[in-house]
Structures are given as structure tokens and as C-alpha cells.
Amino acid sequence: MTSPRITEAELQVMKLLWTQEPLSAQEIIEALGEQMQWSDQTVKTFLNRLHKKKAIRFEKVGRNYLYYPSVTREAYLKDENRSFLDRVYDGAVGVLLARFVEAEKLSPREIEELQQLLEEKKKS
């Protein structure tokens, strides 16, 4: 299953839920309202959108709704990485990796880690 398309704003809600779950709407509003300058209604709109996209689920406990992520961070990142790779590099992971290595400063440790990953990939 591919992850739903999540906007940049909705991603802020998801990031919060990935680090701490479950959260009530009020807890989400308190955490993001001030930080993002969002009104209560804006946060509730994002919660509704994410629920319709099946990115989150909720459970009613008393008078509160507790929200949980339905999509893992790992699944989301995998799908986003694939989407970016396909859109920008026509799926050519080697070209992406080469551009990244050429453009970024890498520490000797990072270079060693990349070499190890490539060696493991070569074996499999």
C-alpha cells in the first residue's frame, strides 16, 4: 500500500504523532497552534483531511478523540523518496547518489558508511 499524499502543513501533524501517540485534538492544537501560528480550526481541518486520507485514525475516549498515525514514518519516507526519485531523476538512483556525493561535503565516517552500504548491496 502506498502512503497518501500529505501536504507540508499536514506533515507537521504527522511528525508530532510519529513522535508521540496517541494525542488528543487539544494536545495537537497546543503543540502546533503556537509553533505554527495556526488557529484551533486550522488544526482540526488538518486532522479531518488526514483522517479522510487514512493517514491517521482516532478513538473516542469519553468526550475526547485520541489520534494515532495509520501510516508509519518509514513507509511515508520510502514512498516520498521513491516519488522524488521518479519525478526528478526518472528513477535513476545511481544518478541521484552521484549528484549527492559530488555536491555534499562528507566526513570520512560518512564515506565509510556509504562504502559499506554499497558493498552490502553488491553482495545481495
Image: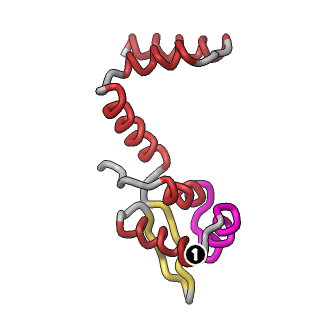
Q: Which residue is mark 1?
A: 25
Which of the 4 image quarters holds residue 110? Answer: top right
Which of the 4 image quarters holds residue 34? Answer: bottom right
Would residue 4 be found to the left or right of residue 114 on screen?
A: left
> What amino acid is at disc 1?
Ala
Packing grade of label 1 (10 A; few <14, some 14-19, many >=20) is some
Would residue 113 be found to the left or right of residue 122 on screen?
A: right
Total numbered labels: 1
Main SS of the magenta part reads helix
Residue 50 is situated, as x and y percent measured from the top left of the image, at 43, 65
Residue 67 is situated, as x and y percent measured from the top left of the image, at 52, 70
Residue closer to the observer: 98 or 27: 98
Q: Residue at x 59, y 74 (%)?
A: 24
**What residue range appears in magenta?**
17-36
Eyeballing the image, is 94 above or below 80?
above
Q: Residue at x 36, y 35 (%)?
A: 82
Residue closer to the observer: 44 or 21: 44
Would residue 13 be found to the left or right of residue 85 on screen?
A: right
Quadrant, the C terminus: top left
Q: Would residue 19 be counted in the magenta stretch?
A: yes
